[in-house]
């Protein structure tokens, strides 16, 4: 007899990743609930997204994060809560509001799994992160401590680099469109990275002679990370955002992911910066002029930037100069999503990039 699907509540269901988690939940046949916060009534775009979900079979639960009793009542109607509240400073940044959600889940007492909003670097491995970017990791760790202190069953999702953020623009900061003429290289262009957001050990075995790479726009050009060999390969994975939603929902009823972190590391999307650039050049039929930027120059302009950009710059630095996404083993407290769910046909980056031709 098939196991009954868990009832899932998504908080932040109209957001960039949240809407994909809602779609994945519906596709997997879960009774799907989406939190309808009162302030959404003033945002016509988000309201239309919610109504579209309703038409597809989702149920809208009206509750405010500022109304504890109402939030508890909403949580008591489901088995699993997934938070996709924004943690990106360039957009909205609402991570700490999740403490209210944790309190509601604790009082409700019925939730068998909570997935807080992470979906990027593993904050537990970023204890030495630079200011001001470390604020993101510090806040996520505060949420984790609250979850674990309340003894709430949980799963953390580390999804590496979102493909749409990092791939078509060759990881530039000022545009999500492909560069047309130049690409600047930072650090080592042969450092391995993976399009989703994290570096992974499995890629070291795949290509131990390579490292990871990354690029950033400061002018109408594309910056590429470095050139040459890397002593210890730094790997990051690029992950299609729809696949993030799919793997997230796959994990919610899986006993293998209970109280663990799952890392999304699709091996075909484990690329160095050089490989990503070469892939785009091959697809587009155009060669980019390459300029190299040493690590010591990368952080120099940060002091004149707005806070949100400073946060992003430091995150880029850790990924592409320090290899923070690949310099660890998953270990017993984690699991790798593509191994857990081999039936998922994830999107390869070469296919993803064809959308931009």
Image (cartoon, helix red, strand yellow):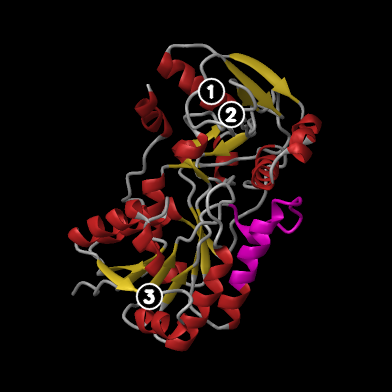
Decide: few, some or many residues near mark 3? Use Cα within 10 Å; few <14, some 14-19, many ≥20.
some
Q: Depth check: 180 or 115 in front? A: 180
Residue 138 is a magenta residue = yes
Q: Which mark is residue 273?
A: 2
Q: Depth check: 158 or 106 in front? A: 106
Tag 1 near tag 2, CB within 8 Å: yes
Q: Position of 313 compared to 201: left or right?
A: right
Sequence-earlier tag: 2 or 3: 3
Disc 1 secondary structure class: helix
Q: Position of 296 compared to 250: left or right?
A: right
Residue 260 is a magenta residue = no
Q: Distance between the residues labelled 1 and 2?
A: 6 Å
Looking at the image, is 148 positioned above or below residue 347?
below
Name the residue beneath numbered marker 3.
Answer: 63
Name the residue beneath numbered marker 1.
Answer: 277
- Would you say residue 341 is visible in this rendering? no
Disc 2 secondary structure class: helix
Q: Distance between the residues labelled 2 and 3?
A: 44 Å
Q: Position of 337 compared to 128: left or right?
A: left
- Quarter in which the N terminus is drawn: bottom left
- Quarter in which the C terminus is drawn: top left
Decide: few, some or many residues near mark 2? Use Cα within 10 Å; few <14, some 14-19, many ≥20.
many
- Would you say residue 15 is visible in this rendering? yes
Residue 124 percent coordinates (x, y): 65, 62
Looking at the image, is 188 positioned above or below residue 56?
above
Residue 38 percent coordinates (x, y): 38, 69
Q: Quadrant of residue 40?
A: bottom left
Disc 3 secondary structure class: loop
From which residue to which does the magenta span run? 121-144
Residue 150 percent coordinates (x, y): 56, 83
């Amino acid at each position: 007899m098939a196991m009954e699907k868990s009832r899932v509540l998504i908080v932040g269901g109209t957001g960039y990743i949240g809407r994909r988690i809602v779609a994945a939940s519906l596709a997997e046949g879960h009774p799907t609930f989406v939190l309808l916060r009162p302030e959404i009534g003033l945002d016509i775009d988000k309201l239309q997204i919610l109504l579209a979900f309703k038409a597809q079979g989702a149920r809208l639960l009206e509750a405010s994060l500022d109304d504890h009793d109402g939030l508890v009542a909403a949580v008591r109607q489901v088995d699993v809560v997934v938070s996709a509240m924004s943690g990106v400073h360039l957009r909205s940044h609402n991570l700490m509001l999740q403490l209210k959600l944790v309190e509601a889940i604790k009082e409700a007492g019925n939730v068998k799994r909570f997935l807080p909003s992470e979906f990027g670097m593993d904050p537990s491995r970023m204890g030495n992160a630079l200011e001001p970017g470390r604020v993101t990791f510090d806040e996520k760790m505060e949420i984790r401590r609250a979850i674990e202190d309340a003894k709430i069953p949980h799963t953390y999702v580390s999804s590496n680099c979102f493909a749409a953020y990092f791939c078509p623009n060759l990881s530039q900061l000022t545009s999500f469109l492909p560069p047309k003429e130049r690409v600047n290289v930072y650090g080592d262009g042969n450092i391995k990275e993976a399009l989703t957001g994290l570096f992974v050990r499995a890629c070291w075995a795949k290509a131990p002679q390579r490292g990871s790479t990354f690029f950033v726009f400061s002018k109408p050009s594309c910056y590429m990370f470095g050139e040459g060999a890397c002593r210890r390969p730094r790997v990051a994975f690029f992950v299609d955002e729809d696949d993030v939603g799919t793997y997230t929902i796959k994990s919610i009823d899986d006993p293998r992911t209970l109280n663990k972190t799952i890392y999304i590391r699709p091996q075909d999307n484990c690329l160095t910066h050089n490989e990503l650039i070469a892939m785009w050049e091959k697809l587009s039929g155009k060669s980019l002029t390459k300029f190299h930027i040493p690590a010591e120059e990368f952080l120099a302009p940060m002091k004149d930037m707005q806070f949100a950009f400073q946060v992003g710059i430091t995150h880029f630095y850790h990924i592409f100069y320090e290899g923070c996404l690949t310099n660890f083993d998953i270990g017993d407290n984690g699991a790798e999503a593509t191994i857990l769910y081999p039936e998922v046909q994830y999107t390869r980056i070469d296919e993803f990039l064809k959308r931009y031709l």
